[in-house]
Image (cartoon, grey):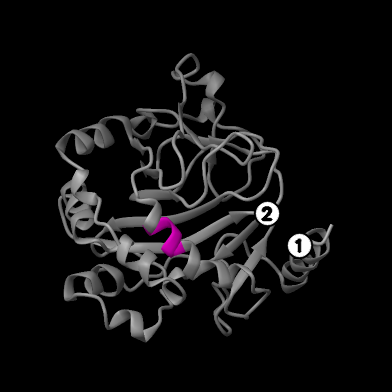
Amino acid sequence: MQETFSKLNQTHLDALKEQGVLVLPDFISEQTINLIRKETSPWLEKVGFNNRISSLIIGNNQWIEHVGLCSLDALKLALDDQFINFLENYFQTSVTLGSLSLQRKIFPEKGIRLHSDRGGGLSIFLYLTNPSEETGLTEFVPHSHATEIKEGYLLKNAIDDATYIDIRKSPFKSKPFKRTIGRKGTLIIFHRGIWHQLPKFKAPGREILMMQYFQKDSPAKDHLVKNSFLQSLSKRQSEVYLSNCSSASLPSLVELGSDPDALGVYKIPTWKMLAYFLRYKVLSKV
């Protein structure tokens, strides 16, 4: 794997703090992207529901919730020492990897309305396929991460998984969006509070490696990982992955045993997971 995070510098750090988002076109090498896709593709071919540990279907998305079970290259990229240095400079403290997952769009969508994710920290999107309007391009409102979301900006009757915003009622109503550009390997780093949206798109197929990072002693997902992968990590990488988090866990898409908090804010019943699974099986053959 080619190391590329050495290209991140103080200018990138200042821009991230000021604007709330960095779009880095073609940042990760095609060789690394191909390695990650080679390791994750077999998991995308295995689709289950409820407690089966493989990929799963939720709505219009296919997920690998714990990439640490299938891709060592993705894990090493997420725990790259130079990237950790950059993140620690941003947070001004040690960090924890909150989640490492893969999302694949399997149907066209009406898109996702403008919203702000709940909780602090940073999110990272790594495009494993070429970004395009046909398959969906995420757009961001620069500087909005530092703006209070007033009651008058809120959209009514929004789903309770994020804060949805009417930009026409905000100070950013005439400001341009920052769009995703580049090819596969494009990396986007953004403050979780920044306002962002996914406009309507016509074709399935977008694959993104998703990472979340928080400052030390924050909640993180209860990662599932291959023991053989852990043996290849340094002490520092293991700490970022497994030790730097608090005792609380972030919600997960995967239900583990009889955990009453499984599936987090989604609370998706088994019958609906089965319906998602069957719809995917039927329509994927058409």
Amino acid identity at mark 2? Ile
Q: Can you say which quadrant of the picture contains the C terminus?
A: bottom right
Q: Nearer the viewer, residue 160 or 66?
A: 66
Quadrant (top left, top right, bottom left, bottom right) of the N terminus? bottom left
Image spot of residue 123 (x, y percent): 39, 49
The disc placed on residue 106 is 2
Residue 218 appears anywhere in the view: no
Asked if 153 appears above or below 217 in the picture, the reply is above
> In front: 137, or 141?
137
Residue at image coords 49%, 67%: 38
Q: Earlier in the sequence, mark 2 or mark 1?
A: 2
Residue toward you, 208 or 73: 73
229 vs 140, left or right, is: left
Q: Few, some or many C-alpha atoms within 10 Å of disc 2 (few <14, some 14-19, many ≥20)? A: many
Element marked by disc 1? helix
Q: Which residue is mark 1?
A: 280
Q: Residue furthest top?
A: 174
Give the left or right position of residue 62, taking residue 126 as reference.
Answer: right
Residues at circles 2 and 1 in contact by the CB criterion of under 8 Å: yes
Q: Magenta span covers which residues?
A: 32-36
Above or below residue 235? Residue 114 is above
Tag count in the figure? Answer: 2
Q: Is residue 75 visible?
A: yes
Percent x, y of residue 7: 20, 44
Q: Main secondary structure of the magenta part?
A: helix
Q: State the CA–CA distance, disc 2 to disc 1.
A: 8 Å
- Rendered residue at 41%/74% (across/down): 223
168 relative to 202, above or below: above
In the image: residue 285, left or right of residue 43: right
